[in-house]
Amino acid sequence: MQRTLTIPAAALAILTAGALAPSAFQAAPTLQVDPLWPKPLPNHWLLGSVTGVAVDARDHIWVVHRGYDSMTARTEIGAATTPKTADECCVPAPPVLEFDAAGTLISHWGGPGDKYEWPVSPGGIAVDGKGNVWIAAAGPPDIPGSANASSRGRAAAATTTTATTTGGAATAGQGRGRGTTPAPPPKPQDAHVLKFSRTGQFLLQIGKAGAPGGNDSTTALNRPAGVAVDPTGAEVYVADGFVNRRVVVFDAATGAYKRHWSGRQGAEFGSVSCAKVAKDGTVYVCDRANNRVQAFDKNGAFLKMGVVAKDTRGTGSVWDVAFSNDPQQRYLYVADGHDQKVFILRRDTLETVGSFGDGGRYPGTFYSVGSVAVDSRGNVYTGETLEGKRVQKFVPRGAGR
Amino acid sequence: MTTRAILTALVAVLLALGLVERRLERTAAAQAKPGVVAPRFEVDPLWPKRLPKNWVLGQVIGVTVDARDHVWIVHRDNLLGANEAAASENPPTASCCVKAPPVLEFDPAGNVVGHWGGPAEGYDWPESNHGITIDHKDNVWIGANVGTDAHLLKFTRAGKFLMQFGKPGQNKGSNDTENFGRPAKIFVDARTNEAYIADGYSNKRVVVIDADTGKFKRYWGAYGNKPDDTSFGNYDPNVPPIQQFRTPVHCAELSNDGLVYVCDRPNDRIQIFTPEGKFVKEVFVAKNTLGDGSVWDIAFSKDPQQKYLFLADGKNEKIYVMLRETMEILTTFGAGGRQPGQFFAVHSIALDSKGNMYTVETYEGRRLQKFVYKGLAPVTKMDQGTVWPK
């Protein structure tokens, strides 16, 4: 596209991925940010904290975000409070957004409904081979370090951040959102996974809000963080989660329990923030707090483990993973929302061979990059939670646009 | 280069720009049917360059441009939290990132070429940084806006401390003649060597001091009234305007033709005065805006006549382009959001000699952005929204 021609090459180089480890005999992918993707949202809509990003078979990009509940009422969404404090700017976008590859918003939906329990806070999002959309209900919101909120000097009391209602435009105008008081009564804690058609029609709910189960439960979850459907479309893998420490597998059509596993002795899971299935059936688990990617076969037999940014403390380094677009899926992209990078790992060895990104609010830099996805052309999409509140696109270097 | 030589060169550039602008204006007027033209801008999405040393910015709370077209910002490094400045934690919890020093100087290409600031012996670093201005002598002024802040600081461009005006905790209100009340911003008049202080977050006035000695010369409130610290409650667009400023009084900018433009932020109005504080007129902008208000910061176009006035509105997230003579809004640009050309709490603006605009964002915006001046162009949309490169 011609807009890229106007960007000085030297400036692009600054934002371009650099290979880290000379041990790789094969050069890791290098990527550069597209600073003008996606296109500006209509209707004065804003993204809240983005908790999930996924790519479907059409190379459309799906985003789920925390909407209203992640907004600061006083300063951010003046057109969505009662009374309004600004005429037009701004209001939270609906929680689920679909973009085409050019970055145009194609569809939007989400929020509370009669037949299902919309999450207190969404987690990951996945689109299966049939085009159905899965969303983990991961709330209360995982906001590490309350200093993050208090440092902004606003009335973001814990009660208001954890106890508000829905996301999305459905409640716009009720004067909620962070920084307002009083908070409504707490909603039941998230403990479920939702399945919708691509147009937002409700299909299935696994687990029930307010009825969490432990690590051995065959019917209940506890703040599941991520969700993925295997390449055959038969089974759904749930990263369970921010409270439980396991992977649970269900029948993707019926929601029937199939199996689950936890980490093995000596390599127990910390928070389990993702579980993604490669084409060859290997399951990659984000053992976030332990800075590890753990690989298993479909039945939970341990295969291998890789450590990423081993000195990371706090929230840990392994927030989400995605596979490269080549047929062998030779690389894993690991979103590290604490070091503010996307690491590139060789999938066969789980060795880190590169990274891109850095901290900041500019194109190509991150604040809390917590989700990652790859399209069929090798473009990498990232979602930023907390106050990052962006989805960004990174293009393979040298690829035509 | 001497200061005089720099000024002479600057004047030459301004005159040249003025000629070019007049020519462009004629061309544009010929193309536009009803014929409204206004300065047009496009964001540069890749400016500035990546900060060195793993630095990140906190709330960016002031911007100014010097005679070399270097861009200066002041930001609140102290408000960066454990998730964002994890490498500044003790012990570090991640490889990224480190709090940048509070004052940063960028060259026109967007490289950091200077940095300093923070508490030290000899002066009271603000509890909360606010407002930065570089004057005709190349000295850097900084405001201060919370708690006991009641003072201004003046440094050389290299960060050597020069003067402190006012003492923390000593403000006695809007008629104090030695201290300020959380002063927001400073403008220095090169012709008279006077500094105009938007005072501020607790006082409700404009103060003029001698820029070298700090001696109070005059001050005034809204409409030129004697300032009064009575609380008038929250702004209400449906009742007659109050006769005093509301805090914060957020800017006081002097034009080349001798008019002082004051940001009466939560009152959603610009009040215009003579340099002596005689009220000339007022204009309301986005009058329904509540809370933080609409009138955050003002900059003038770089032609000698300063034909246009730019107003930053960090609540409605846009920049208004106004015809200064009539104070009519010709067009606006900007939108809420985190992408290039969008804003979260656009707080301050400044222009370089080429007419490029720089904006900074507070709260969770935390950016310095550059908008490239594209000349005068016919206005086709009242609200341009996000202005990306075409």
Image (cartoon, coloured by chain):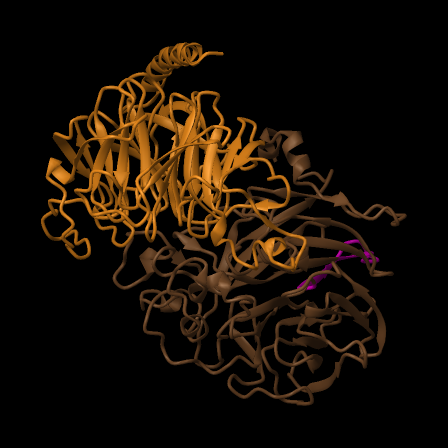
Chain colours: A brown, B orange
A27 and B365: which is toward the camera? B365
> What x and y, as percent, mark residue B203?
22, 46
| Majority secondary structure in the magenta region | loop
Q: Residue A349, relative to residue B118: is it above or below?
A: below
> What x and y, as percent, mark residue B129?
41, 44
Q: Is residue A19 magenta?
A: no
Question: Quick one: quadrant of the C terminus of chain A?
Answer: top right
Q: Quadrant of residue A211?
A: bottom right
Classify residue B320 as left or right of residue A351: left
- Magenta-highlighted residues: A318-332
Q: Residue A50, relative to residue B109: is it above or below?
A: below
Classify residue A293 as left or right of residue B50: right
Residue lying furthest front: B122
Q: Quadrant of residue A84?
A: bottom left
> What x and y, as percent, mark residue B213?
30, 27
Q: Quadrant of residue B40?
A: top left
User: How many numbered markers are drawn?
Assistant: 0
B195 and A297: which is toward the camera? B195
A80 and B99: which is toward the camera? B99
Q: Is residue A326 magenta?
A: yes
Q: Residue A169, relative to residue A366: is it above or below?
A: below
Q: Please indicate, yes or no, whether residue B298 appears anywhere in the rendered image.
A: no
Classify residue A168 as left or right of residue A381: left
> What x and y, as percent, mark residue A162?
46, 74
Instruction: Tell me the residue at 16%/27% (across/down).
Output: B276
Q: Please indicate, yes or no, whether residue B387 appears anywhere in the rendered image.
A: yes
Question: Quick one: quadrant of the N terminus of chain A?
Answer: top right
